[in-house]
Amino acid sequence: MREMIPLWLCIPFAGLLLCIAILPLIKPNWWEEHQPHAVAFWSLLFVVPFALMYGVFHASETVLECMVNDYLTFIVLLFGLFCVSGNITMSGDLAGSPRINVGLLALGTILSSWIGTTGASMLMIRPIIKMNAWRKHRRHIIVFFIFLVSNMGGCLTPIGDPPLLMGFMRGVPFFWSLHLTPVLLFNMVLLLFIFYWIDRRAYRTDIAKGLKPDISKPGTEIKIRGAHNMIFIVMIVAAVILSGTLPSLPMFQDAEGKVLGIHILGEVVLSYPAVIEIAIILLAAFLSFKTTDASIRRENHFTWSAIKEVAVLFVGIFITMQPALMLLKASGPKLGITDPFQMFWATGLLSSFLDNTPTYLVFLTTAGSLGFTGGMMTALGSVPIKMLEAISAGAVFMGANTYIGNAPNFMVKSIADENGIRMPSFFGYLIWSFGILTPVFILDTLLFFL
Amino acid sequence: MNREEIKELAEHIYDLDAEVYIHLGSSLGRVFNRDRERCVNELTELLMTRPQGHVVRSELALIANMARTLEDKEERKLCMSEYDRILKEVMSLPTSFAHGDVLDPDLAELNAFNLKERFSDQDHLIVCISWTYGSGGNEVGFRLSDKLKISYYDAEIFEAVLKRLDAEKDSFHDTAGYASEVKDEISQSPASAFAPAKKLTLRQRFREFSRYHGLSKRDAVFFNQSDLLCDMAKKEDFIIMGRCGDAIMTNNKIPHISIYITAPFEQRVLRAVEVNSGLDERKARRLLHHLDRRHSRYYNFYTGRKWGHANNYDLCINTASYGIDGTVDFILKMIDGGRK
């Protein structure tokens, strides 16, 4: 596009976010019924003026580009993991207590890097809800779950979070992200410590009210049903890895080095690696359903509403965030951001509201264009290690700042909402993240990115 | 709307939650996760005091969240119409039923000194005695049980819990009682103070983790103790010494009498030295400070109340004013007076 996109085109994005934040509080029933209408309204409010300004063809190309290349793979991955994890159930009489919860959160955080934040979230959320079912005060458990399992834990490998996969596709070695281990460990210890004390307080309040877990039988029995579905989770993780590695193979490229695929419109192409990824994920979901007894889903309170809500809202979010992303692409390199700490905060704050994958790419491109000679050689130029760490950490960690910062956040919230946990509202969650995460990120800046 | 009608409304709310939960067949928990009677009573109080408060509405909204996910259209429709009906009733309640009386109906209902109103024919006489070491509380409890001809429970509860948990006695300290701590203090040799703590092997750790359902030993014992006391309260009259019995009974809406027995510190030191040969005054002072601190921490942790605060009890007695027999007589008079 030749000219700079006007700022007012970002209004539909802000409007949609405000609807997500406010309407569930003031008109919950209306919001539940009319989510698709609100999404359509705000999307059209962006698409129509955009088409009038830049032409119908360009507008269609922009919408299709984000739907085909970003939204489709995003929602299919979420759908696949949602289906497969819904077919695994854990039953037993392990009682949710502060130390058990700390252990589960730590396990989930570590797991996130190896099966993805979405995979770990979907796999762990139900057992955590189940173990804490005897308690009344539990929303903080889910909030910290979103902080650690749905976001931060994904920083160690490209499987963990999509921005890192994008970096891997641009020449960052697969195991390079392990450089972030000290930052992750620091954040994990700090957050788990804070969590322990908050949970202990809530646990005491619950006990003082006379709530108690059923531990009348001596000994704990833990049974996992549908464990064979772990194969399908591995299958989905493999599909994600393939989507990152196949595009660089010559057989998937044309003579100019462009990735081959199904042509949709203009420059919009659904690449063959993406088709393979989608096919594998859908096959895994299908096989999971075919091979798992329906009673497991019933026991897991498996319903389609959580994925439906995320699918609907994120169509609007992906479409309406386009002008903001275009603005960022155009003005990112001119922002004068040259230090790692600036990269950490800029990538992070924008990733809190925008899709963290393009945000990561914008700042990686900016860093690559700054003319550094040492550091990591990527397809976008040399990037100093500290700066790459800052961009990666910012994109992954700060997705935890809002419900829309990372794909699993909203999903986890919806599942918790459906199972008797009163989750904070959009703004309520912002208070949690501002109060707890901001000090942690300031410490990260002082210790690792200055 | 009178109390009975509000109670009926609370019952409808509870039943709706139960119905939704049954239809879902889920095992992930529900909104009201305790027994019917207790939840209904709490809801009734909530509706009586703050009918427009956000709490009841939020609880209802959570039930509706779950109801909306019911797959069977008929079941969903039935549950949602019941939800709408209940919501309308809740919203139509006046904002306050306060009448200016300081009486807390919840507390008064449990106050055994209102015996005429408190105990029904089906209720057993349960006396919960909290006491400071050296005040003669255990003697009072024991003699009282003798006079009332009812059971007396102290360390016996702990033994029963160990049996339930299938645990070895050596691996435990009865943190809710005084006996083991006092014994330790008296028999403590300088060498034992520096003895290294017993280390557990990985296998033993796993066994403990499984045995206590992932909880700490202390929590597992407390929860079992609570269960046991509630079960016993259905079967017999008894006196329970300490063990947060008063809070457990209150939380489970079991009528009881709660008594706190203490005496001035100097008096307690004298008695501690008198009844424990081998305990000198210096040791006794240290022991009492230590026991008070530990018991206070234990009680505060599990009940959210402050140990020894008069607000928590029906009766607080200074045994230095009455002596042990006098205290027993005093309590007996109160109980008999209430029963007449």
Image: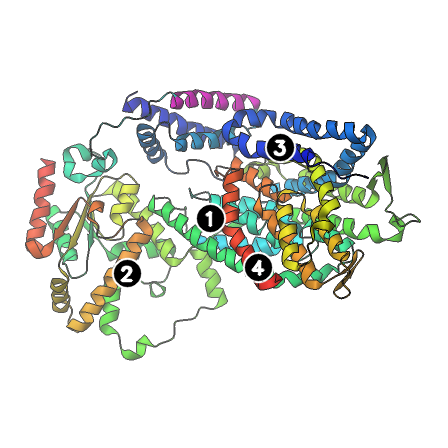
Q: Are marks 2 and 4 on the same chain?
A: no
- Picture disc at residue A16: 3
Q: Which residue is mark 4?
A: A444
Q: Tell which tag, 1 or 2, sits nearer the viewer.
A: 2
In terms of secondary structure, where does tag 3 sit?
Answer: helix
Q: Which residue is mark 1?
A: A93
Tell me which amino acid carries mark 3: Leu
Q: Residues within 10 Å of mark 1 (few under 14, many from 20)?
A: many
Q: How far from the left and from the top, in percent, is residue A420?
A: 48, 37
Left or right of B183 in this view: A444: right
Q: Which residue is mark 2?
A: B294
* Range drawn in magenta: B73-91
Q: Are marks 4 and 3 on the same chain?
A: yes
Residue A173 visible in image: yes
Spatial distance from mark 4 to mark 1, Cα to Cα? 38 Å
Q: Are marks 4 and 1 on the same chain?
A: yes
Q: Tell which tag, 3 or 2, sits nearer the viewer.
A: 3
